Amino acid sequence: MLLSEGSKKTYKSYLLNINSRQYRVVCDANDTLLDIIRGQLKLTGTKRGCDCGQCGVCNVIVNGKVVRACITRMKNVPEHAEILTVEGLGTPDNLHAVQWAFIANNAIQCGFCTPGFIMSAKGLLDKTLSPSREEVRQWFQQHWNACRCTGYKQIVDAVMDAAAVLRGEKEMYEFSAMLKPGEYIWGTNYPRPSDKYKVTGTWDFGDDAGMQLPKDTLYAALVHVDVNHANILNLDITEAEKMPGVVKVVTAKDIYAAGGTNKLFGAQPPQVKGDGWERPILCDKKIFMWGDVVAVVCAESYEEAEAAVPKVKVDLEELPAVMNVEEAIKPDCIEIHPGVPNIYFETHVKKGADAGEIMEQMPYSIEDVFYLQRQPHLVLENDVGFGYWDEDGNLAIQSKHIWIYKAAAFMARGIGLQPSKIRIIQNKAGASFGYKLGITNEAMIAAAVIATGRPVFCRYDTRHHVTYTPKRAPALMRVAMAADANGRITAIDHTSWVDHGPYSEFSPGLVSKLPHYMGSLYGISNVRGTAYGVYTNQKWNTAFRAWGAPQVHTAQEIAVDMLAERVGMDPLEFRYINAIRPGQTFPFGQSPDVFPLAEMVDILRPKYRAAIERAKSGSSEKIKKGVGVAFGVYNSNSAGPDKAYNNIELLPDGGVMLYNTWEEHGQGADIGMVGTAHRALAPLGIAPEKIRLFINDTFRCPDSGPAAASRCQVMVGHAIVDSCNKLLDAMRREDGSFRSYDEMVEEGLPLLYSGSYGCVTKNEKGEIVPCVHTDANGQGMPYACYMYGLFMAEVDVDVSTGKTWVSKMTLIDDVGVINNYGVVDGQMYGGLAQGIGLALQEDFEDPAKYNNLITCGFPYIKDITDDMELIHMETPREFGPYGASGAGELPLTSPHAAIANAIYNACGARVTRLPATKEKVLALLKEKHR
Ligand code: FES
Ligand code: FES
């Protein structure tokens, strides 16, 4: 039968010159250049991020111009175009100057944005070899290069260095030459082992790995329901299953048929009211939040799966939506999980005398209500993963998860398999910042693999990713604080309500952070506090960098400024006299591991005074300048009895292999491991490149716990040292020299050694004891190590519009002895940038509106100051390996509070509910002048 003219699909052939090779590409003229580069030519160095022109990870050069390949239609690509992608620039063994400079300047974290930045930078340096820093920044802004990890500063540093190399003023050096024989990597800027792959686009992320799956792989598209709260009356998949290419539409019925409960669990303790199993894998009775998923369409192609999604029919009975905690806690509010109160968890702290009574006797006191908003993680790599049955009949899931052992445990009952039959492997991840502590796609992929018997790949588009994945939980906090006649803070009383959306998973740990840390840096003797976990129909929540700390520090640090004003003291000096000192304890009764705060103030004082002078002299009628400060603290191990394991194996070439699950999400796990092991194995004199990593596979690696709470350098670091010491002991001869691999084999000695670590601290008698959870009064010794900071923000506020610009951030940090300066600097710059975003523009309130990077307030380079100053105090930690503590959470503990305080200092607008948008600041200014 002949096809009619109208049913013929036609294609166009293009002659293109890509990376100096000629291609004849046949495609639809409406296909994007990214579809061709990645999909057809498999040049996966160019990444797919937002797919809508907002992130620049797909930037390539076409006829000398930097373009975003995801929005460049083939019909607009000229015939014979000269196209350069990252693959045409350099290779891991032969780097281009720009690639080298990115490594040399530690301008890479997760690396997902890196090829796009590098191609943009190449486009700029092809035009000028002497750009100013501002020109580099403007160029990246113009070409939409977004980075969520680095804070941009080190990227601009890299471009300036690359330009110097290309001008012939600087030499590229071999990174191995950074070390002299016998030196450790520890305590240097030595690059991450992954860097040379990230800069050359050869670091395969989940979407890249998904293109290497077997031919019979199915593509999954999720059927989200866009209402906030509803009963499901009927779900009809008949039409969808008839759509071309559709193999199956998976629903909750398939999960039940496979023996699953269709429910997920997330580490809730028994104190949670209800059973903690309230999150369905696929909703079949109720919709609890916007974007909940009712079905997974599995088809032969991504396009066919997507096309069938609208054919799934869902009949709903809409219910009242409970969109904030004020509503949720009203006695007559609808119960989101019928039979379970909306306040599903509460925790308390009680230390010293009754704080309320003490306050009544004090000459100075303040009380106010504070709010930290729901913060979206805004990673550039959308959620992505895949699953398949492995050769031993186990279900394998590869995703971005950052607690892979628990991922298997949390979903096992839900999908109807034993945890031992679920193998989780972490893909290379384009950042997480904590959102991947939650099960996002894993259980749905598992259900689809079980239902179809075929490999299944699933990548969220940006709207689904932003809408569906969990966020930072907002908190509403009432704080009352009092000081005596000398300005000493004597009492704090507080109540907090944490909005955790409809699912309680992990939240008791988060809710407990509020009483743990509220007032923590001031050694306050009399503390009373309560925190509640509350269900709403808002977005579900999970970990986000410094989990709980930004909430606490919003209230604590703004309240401290208010109290300083009431006392009549300068905010920095008020902090100095009140900073926690030896003999004092945190609200939970434990002594800090070190006491660096007063010294931090001493270091900052001259800079602070200079900044105040700058603000005074630089302010005008329209632009008011101000300075604000804030302390920050966070723990470096999970609360309570935290544990980690690592194995090490001696290899035939004298190198070693480390096996563990220190999950990598861009924070620098690889150099963390290599740096620690290189130091521990120093007696063997092993070259860094001979310390190899086999990581993040639950069937091959021991459990090292989550890559969260900045715990890995401490916990996994200790386990690595322990295993290294065991290997050294086995290799050591009586005369102190070491056996070779061959000698170990000849003597029949084991080659593989297991190390472990359980966190410990010191009690009040100075005895070393295991860390334990706090008791009913919130008292105990939950943590081993902490990190501390003093933040200073300098801002300009345009009082005619309310718009704030952060002109400088200064951070004095103490994260113990530093393993790798490049990594720690990067964590600090990146965290400060996220703090600026949190303070001024990031939000996620109405899920119908917050569905892409721009509406969520993503901080681009124009939003982030290039002027960031870091000062590292490195007080050695008794319970950290080689004196190290954690680092990554610290920079997002309280930069936003320093900014809020700076806004007040600049113009008198006291922002207590973040973000400090221009509308909010302007309204406060108007109110003040009314
Ligand atoms: Fe192309 Fe984001 S701009 S993927
Ligand atoms: Fe830029 Fe992760 S390094 S987004």
Image: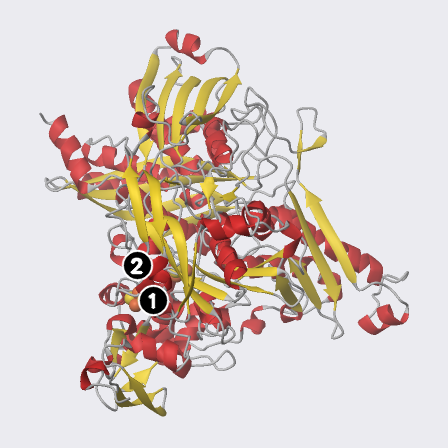
Badge 1 is on which residue? 243
Quadrant of image for the N terminus = bottom left
Query: What mark, if any, has residue 440 been given in the picture?
Result: none
Whereabouts is ligand 1, in terms of quadrant? bottom left
* Residue 882 shows in this picture: no
Q: Position of residue 624 (x, y in %)?
A: 17, 40
Mark 1 / mark 2, whichever is N-terminal: 1
Q: Are marks 1 and 2 in contact (CB under 8 Å)?
A: yes
Q: Label 2 amino acid?
A: Lys
User: Outermost residue toward the front?
Assistant: 1
Q: Report the label total.
A: 2
Q: CA distance from mark 1 to mark 2?
A: 8 Å
At a point 37% along the width and 39% down the height, the residue shown is 288
Q: Quick one: 45 or 803, which is closer to the camera?
A: 45
What colour scheme was applied to this rendering of the protein?
secondary structure
Q: Quadrant of residue 56?
A: bottom left
Q: Is 526 or 343 nearer to us in this picture?
A: 343
The structure residue drawn at horizontal position 38% and vertical position 12%, both measured from the top left corner, is 485
For residue 497, above or below residue 59 = above
Tag 2 residue: 311
Q: Position of residue 554 (x, y in %)?
A: 36, 33
* Left or right of 6 on screen, residue 643: right
Residue in view at x 53 percent, y 17 percent: 351
| Mark 2: secondary structure | helix
- As drawn, 853 above or below 199: above
Residues packed near mark 2 inside 10 Å, few (<14), some (14 to 19) or many (20 plus) = some
- Where is residue 51 drawn, in percent x and y? 30, 66
Left/right of residue 588 with respect to residue 431 in the rendered view: right
Residue type beneath disc 1:
Met
